[in-house]
Image (cartoon, grey):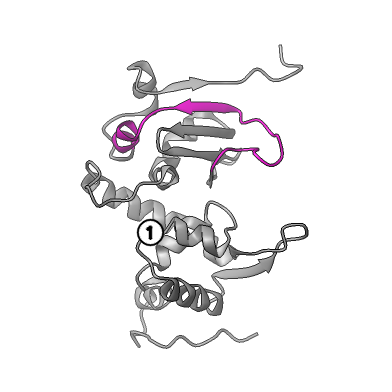
Amino acid sequence: MPRQQRRRSYDQHCAAARALDLVGDRWTLLVVRELLAGPRRYTDLHADLPGVSTDMLAGRLKDMEGAELVTRRRLPPPASAFVYELTPRGRELLPVLRTLAAWGAPDLGEPRPTDAVRAHWYAIPLLGAFAGLGAGVVQVTLDEGEFFVRVGGDGSVSYGDGAYGAATGEVPDARLRTDAATCRALAGGESTLAEAIEAGRAALERPVRAGRS
């Protein structure tokens, strides 16, 4: 199926310009940020993108479907709702967002009075901090909410919103309790995870699994 033509283009034969043709519009990369955490209903996306209008979000999702970054599918009964999820091409934007987050982390500072905050927004800048824990799933709990990080045996990382195993009963390999200020310090390179744990700014627990000595 031919790729749908977008309404706007920089019309420059440049790889960066081509990339911005696809993801340079306002809100597009933040939609990607949300969908990197897993499939989401439209209402969930709208709730975690405060400030976006319903028309703007619908338009961005339509553009992203046309660019083959996002697909829409119906969940099986009894849910029978539609969800949006990233295509493999869309998931390739994770390193882009990690680099962008690393570049922006020094300017993050304290939340402004007008800033919305979601726990899983800290996930991307913190992915590298969990690599030293080895392969497995780490559940992260903040006052603002929860998210989890998966570390693969090959060092690959991904993340999800909410409590890991909430629907399946699976148990994470480790649980980390910390706060937003520590997350900002980790993201900005002011502290390592080991230093935060040693200083009591983060607490790491590894659940004892059945059959494990």
Quarter occupied by the N terminus: bottom right
Image coordinates of residue 36 in percent, x first then y, are 52, 55
What residue would you read off at disc 1? Answer: 50
Q: Which residues are magenta?
A: 162-186
Image coordinates of residue 170 in percent, x first then y, are 69, 34
Image coordinates of residue 20 in percent, x first then y, are 37, 74
Image coordinates of residue 211 in percent, x first then y, are 76, 17
Residue at x 25% of width, y 46% of height: 108
The one of 45 and 204 positioned closer to us in this rendering: 45
Residue at x 48% of width, y 33% of height: 140
Image check: 57 left or right of 117? right
**Viewer can see residue 93:** no
The one of 77 and 27 positioned closer to us in this rendering: 77
Secondary structure of the residue carrying numbered label 1: loop
Image check: 109 left or right of 152? left
**Quarter of the view holding residue 172:** top right
**Quarter of the view holding residue 55:** bottom left
